[in-house]
Image: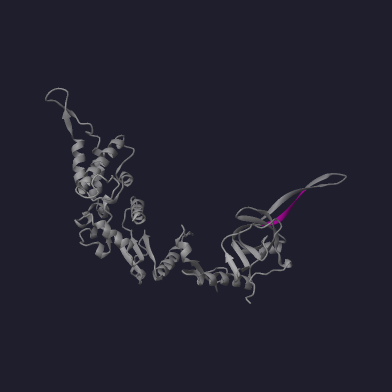
Amino acid sequence: MESIVLRYDKGESIGSINSVDTGMATAIIDSDDVLSQLQINQLIAIQSPKSGRYIIAMIVKIYRKATDMTLNDDEDEEDTSSAFNQVRLVFVGEFMDKAGEQSNVFRRNVSAVPSISALCYKIEGTRLTDLMQTISNKLATSISPLAIGKYTMDESSIAYMDGDKLFQRHAAIVGSTGSGKSFCVACIVEQMAKLKHSNAILFDIHGEYSSTDFKIDGIKQYKIATPGDLATSEKLNNNILMVPYWLLNYEEMQALLLDRSDQNAPNQAMIFSREVLAEKEKGVEGTIYEHLITVDSPVAYDLQTVLTRLKSKDEEMVPGARAGSEKLGPYNGKLTRFNQRLENKLSDKRMGFMFSLQTEEKSQNWLKDFARVLMKADGGVKVIDMSEVPSDVLPLVIGLLARIVFTV
């Protein structure tokens, strides 16, 4: 029979709970000597109201709190103070002696918070080692274990994460500079690549996962086209990704091109969207999509043609009230700044991955090939080097790629 990892006598108690919240508690520590031995992030076992269980908590604060006491006697009153030792604890899980046919089961949730005056015990020595190994062994035998390092509390135990649970949730890896965030991500990605049915995309913002050192089986490296890549033919076959402007929806186009502080911004947005939709409708004439698309539809169109028409609107003169006279058109002079911004984007080599399109990127079939590259059935991890994307449009580009993946 497997021995129980956590088992304490009452005499081993270091203190008791004096306040409880939904996810944390405070405990009074019995002696100064015990308090001096405690450390931040140390694990504590708290007596659970359910038999055969301990609530596992982590120390996040250690302090001595003063309390005022008044002593009364026949002659006078004297104000004195005393101090008691406290620690603040955050619940991290629950340890059960038995769960069905399993022994020594740790779960990252708490089924019942501790009672007031519940006894607290230190988890140290062989108990800490056995607890860490219990957690590691359970995760190591899960379907998709990911080894991320070793526990600082017990370096003989490997720290694992359950891959299935990690990828089904939102998650963040946080830490100070130099704490190992990038190394942790690299470990996870390398192990993801070895999983049988992995299929993931990594947006490599700074190019740290796009070096030759990170080329292993199961990892495919792509990059957003740089100015030197714009003349390359068959870019997708050469692991070069373009992000054509015609994939942008109405909101993204406004964010990229519109200056909302311009008093003519509403007119500019309206005219631009109308001209874009007109060009997109030309591209689907005679197809099953005729009269069904919107300005958000990912239909290839010629932005240079749109710019030419906007310039015409900006310079347009219309017949005046008198015969043979002319007056300014309704949008004359109101599109000038917008057109200048659009021209600057079209000529900016840094934005070539979006605006300097060749024939293949202007084809409607290009989107199908692009989606196949990002989401191909043979899976693996696709690393996209985005280090050359200008920082002011980086969030927009990432959002666009993520939207395509989510939608398709």
In this picture, residue 43 sits left or right of residue 186: right
Classify residue 16 as left or right of residue 399.
right
Overall secondary structure of the magenta section: strand
The image shows residue 382 at horizontal and vertical percentages of 34, 64
Q: Examine the rendered structure and indicate whether residue 295 appears above or below residue 132.
A: above
- Would residue 82 be seen by someone viewing this image from the given angle? yes
Q: Does the magenta stretch include residue 82?
A: yes
| Residue in the foreground of this view, choosing between 196 and 74 | 196
For the N terminus, the image quarter is: bottom right
The residue sitting at the bottom extreme is: 1
User: What span is colored magenta in the figure?
Assistant: 80-86
Quadrant, the C terminus: bottom left
**Image point (26%, 60%), residue name:** 369
Residue 297 in percent (x, y) is at 29, 48
Residue 13, relative to residue 336: is it above or below?
below
Q: Is residue 55 above or below residue 339?
A: below
Q: Which residue lies furthest to the top in this view?
A: 322
Quarter of the image for residue 116 reads: bottom right
Side of 9 where 176 appears, left or right: left
- Left or right: residue 132 versus residue 369 is right
One can see residue 178 in this view: no
The picture quadrant where one finds residue 14 is bottom right
The way the protein has been coloured in the rendering is one colour
Furthest residue in direction left, as rendered: 324
Q: Position of residue 155 (x, y in %)?
A: 55, 72
Closer-to-camera residue (70/190) = 190
Residue 348 forms part of the magenta stretch: no
Q: Looking at the picture, how far across and down is residue 290, in whole percent?
A: 23, 46
